[in-house]
Image (spheres, rainbow, N blue to C red):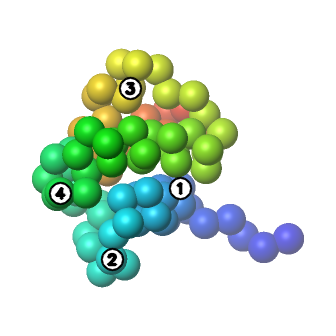
């Protein structure tokens, strides 16, 4: 069986797909509303994509607090233990 990608790489791919970003975007530096694609609608699409990809359910507070790639990554690390 092949190696799975590190969590940050998986999350980076989810951000690129959900927000329809160019592969060259420095996803790790993204912040909510920092780019046009990550508005309130993009945020909900991103939340849904993260929940689907990682088989997690984010709490309302987590959805509200997810203000950057780093925050999302920290939340996932905590959820996935």
Q: As displayed, is residue 78 above or below residue 41?
A: above
Q: What distance separates the C-alpha of mark 4 from that of mark 3?
A: 21 Å
Q: Nearer the viewer, mark 2 or mark 1?
A: 2
Q: Secondary structure at mark 4?
A: loop
| Disc with the residue nearer the chain's start (4 vs 3) | 4
Residue 7 bears which disc, if any?
A: 1
Q: Is residue 8 visible?
A: no
Q: Are marks 1 and 4 in contact (CB under 8 Å)?
A: no
- Residue 69 location, x and y as percent? 32, 50
Q: Nearer the viewer, mark 3 or mark 2?
A: 2
- Residue 59 location, x and y as percent? 47, 20
Q: Which residue is mark 3?
A: 62
Q: Nearer the viewer, mark 1 or mark 4?
A: 4
| Disc with the residue nearer the chain's start (2 vs 1) | 1
- Where, quadrant-wise, is the C terminus in this rendering? top right
Q: Nearer the viewer, mark 3 or mark 1?
A: 3
Q: Categorize mark 2 by other alpha carbons within 10 Å: few (<14), some (14-19), many (20+).
A: few
Q: Which residue is mark 2?
A: 22
Q: Are marks 3 and 2 in contact (CB under 8 Å)?
A: no
Q: Is residue 80 left or right of residue 47?
A: right
């Amino acid at each position: 069986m092949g190696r799975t990608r590190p969590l940050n790489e998986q999350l980076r791919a989810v951000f690129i797909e959900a927000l329809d970003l160019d592969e060259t975007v420095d996803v790790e530096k993204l912040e909510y509303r920092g780019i046009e694609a990550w508005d309130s609608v993009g945020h909900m699409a991103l939340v849904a994509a993260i929940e689907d990809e990682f088989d997690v359910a984010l709490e309302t507070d987590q959805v509200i607090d997810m203000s950057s790639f780093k925050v999302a990554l920290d939340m996932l690390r905590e959820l996935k233990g």
